[in-house]
Amino acid sequence: MKKQRICVDMDDTMCDTVGEHLARYNAEHGVNVLREQFHGQWLWDFVPEEHRPFLKKTMSCDDFFEDLDVFPHAVRVLERLQQHYEIYIATAAMIFPNSFASKYRWLQRHVPFISSDQYVYCGDKSILHADYLIDDIPGYLDRFMGQGVLFTQGHNVSNTKYPRVKDWLEVEEYFLPGGKARTESGVPRAEERPQD
């Protein structure tokens, strides 16, 4: 039986991109901005307009994506998912072309069991051909032709359009056999769906 395919976003889904951005912002400006202060919006929208060029410059640094913290349980759950699904890492790298090499090294270091043939560097994620896309950005899910699953982050808390997972333990429950969770929208877990 053919495995279903899941595309998984990297930034703020597998790893803490906002945390790195915030740490660099605080160090540069001598402030102590906390995530709670910009909950419900992007850091970009929270900071003074004159600080926004620094945010863009930071993400363009060759090393920005190199050492991002992995979210708890992400590696273990991805390894389990790979036993039941085809897993592809789909990351929007086109906005920051300097990110290609550091994202590649990050993936090689943290998820070596996923082949580099299964890395997809893209801009518009509507080109992805998969059954599911797990992502923190609702706009990518809007154009995706399969089932979008929203990975909860502060900037997407008001979105109610997609099934939502708050962490990798909920990803595990949603997708793996024996899981108890159903999404708020009632979409069945993948193993409960009829197979072709």
Image (spheres, grey):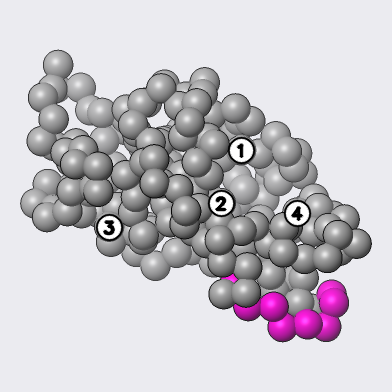
Comes first in the chain, label 4 or label 1: 4
The quarter in which the C terminus is drawn is top left
Residue 76 in view: no
**Amino acid tagged 2:** Asp
The residues bearing labels 4 and 2 have C-alpha atoms spaced at a distance of 12 Å
Q: Which residue is mark 4?
A: 59
Comes first in the chain, label 3 or label 1: 1
The quarter in which the N terminus is drawn is top left
Q: How many marks?
A: 4
Residue 33 is tagged as: none
Mark 3 element type: helix
**Coordinates of residue 113 in the picture (x, y in percent):** 38, 47
Q: Which residue is mark 3?
A: 170
Q: Are marks 3 and 2 in contact (CB under 8 Å)?
A: no
Residue 92 is tagged as: 1
Q: What stretch of residues is rendered in magenta?
A: 28-35
**Amino acid tagged 4:** Met
**Res. 133 image quadrant:** top left
